[in-house]
Amino acid sequence: MEDLAALAAATPGASAPALARCLARGRPLTRPVANADDLRLDLFGIRETAPVAALTAAADGLATHGDARYWLRVDPVTLTADLTRVFMTARGLTDIEAADRDPLQACVESVLDDAGYRLLQGRPGRWLLALDADPGVRFTRLEDALGVDLAEVLPDAADAREWRRVLTDVQVALHNAKVNVRRRARGVREVNGVWIWGGGRLPKTRIPAAFECVVSEHPVSQGLAALAESTVRPGAEQDAAAAIADGGRVLVDWAVGRSGALEELGRLERFFAGLLPDVRRGRLAVTLLDGGGRGWQLDRAALRRFWRRARPLDAAVSGAREART
């Protein structure tokens, strides 16, 4: 669960007895990682900074073992300005009408082509660059740049001037693009910029087959699964349940939906409620991890620790840093 803390904060006092039981009775663990993408690598036995773009390319069939290119993500974003600052307030194209996506992509492609770069697309809306060499520029992760003044997160090294110019040229072109002129007139969200980030190459060593099946919509987990030759299933609840029923080690990379926090919590609660009978019978052991590397291990013996009283999700997550026995 990438952002369990945010889900808990958004649903204060909400009832989720199965999930609360896991957090109360599960044995605490911590995996020292910087972010959720590094955690995904760590679960596959790789302790390094996640090359998000390269793994996205692997997930989308654009790269495989032996690919030595340096990959970068190019994510479409929405920029909002006040008198002195510019912020990224949204990302992606999932809520953009299909008819507007192609002209937006064509506009970005044209600017990058003029700058000497070729925009690649794996799945719709997942844009990438493949370079022959490391550009020597370190971009801020998109998740860390959202909502932050761009002046604070743009690369400022001398070698980054070209990339800052490219980002500016894309913004100008998108602002003037007919598709965005129409969207402004309608009062709907524009895609008026891109964020370049996630640079890196695929790991040189083969990815260990840590899981027989990976259930995920996330490109990093999908890319790791592809390289490890694990079975990949979509991220729906029924796919996760089916994968677990098949046996073996299963990674469920729980994706947060767009349906609201309470409904999302309900989905997660139904999933855990379905797991508890098999845990109780000793047929299944569960490890729940959040994106920060905090976790809980729940097996038959842990589930019997009846003296550990369940608390509301927000209280359980906020208290997870306390020492527990």
Image (cartoon, rainbow, N blue to C red):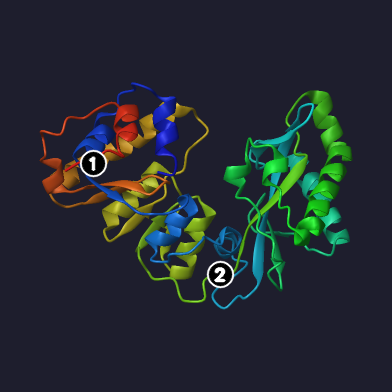
Task: Kindly report which numbered mark, 1 or 2, lies closer to the viewer in this rendering.
Answer: 1
Residue at 81% in and 58% down? 162
Tell me if 152 is positioned left or right of 59 in this view: right
Tell me if 161 is positioned left or right of 212 in this view: right
Q: Secondary structure at mark 2?
A: loop
Q: Position of residue 146 (x, y in %)?
A: 62, 39
Tell me if 213 is positioned left or right of 62 in this view: left
Q: Earlier in the sequence, mark 1 or mark 2?
A: 2
Tell me if 186 is positioned left or right of 281 in this view: right
Q: Secondary structure at mark 1?
A: loop
**Can residue 312 be seen from the camera position used here?**
yes
Residue 8 sits above or below residue 237 on the image: above
Q: How many marks?
A: 2
Residue at 15% in and 45% down? 302
**Can residue 77 be seen from the camera position used here?**
no
Where's the N terminus, which quadrant? top left
**Marks 1 and 2, Cα distance to the nearest angstrom?**
37 Å
Residue at 42% in and 32% down? 7
- Observer-nearest residue: 97 or 193? 193
Q: Position of residue 279 (x, y in %)?
A: 18, 46
Labelled pair 1, 2 in contact (Cβ < 8 Å): no
Q: Amino acid at mark 1?
A: Ala
Residue at 35% in and 54% down? 31
Which corner quadrant of the image does residue 51 belong to?
Answer: bottom right
Q: Position of residue 182 (x, y in %)?
A: 84, 31
Which corner quadrant of the image does residue 230 belong to?
Answer: bottom left
Q: Amino acid at mark 2?
A: Leu
* Residue tagged 2: 202
* Residue tagged 1: 323
Residue 183 sits above or below residue 321 on the image: above
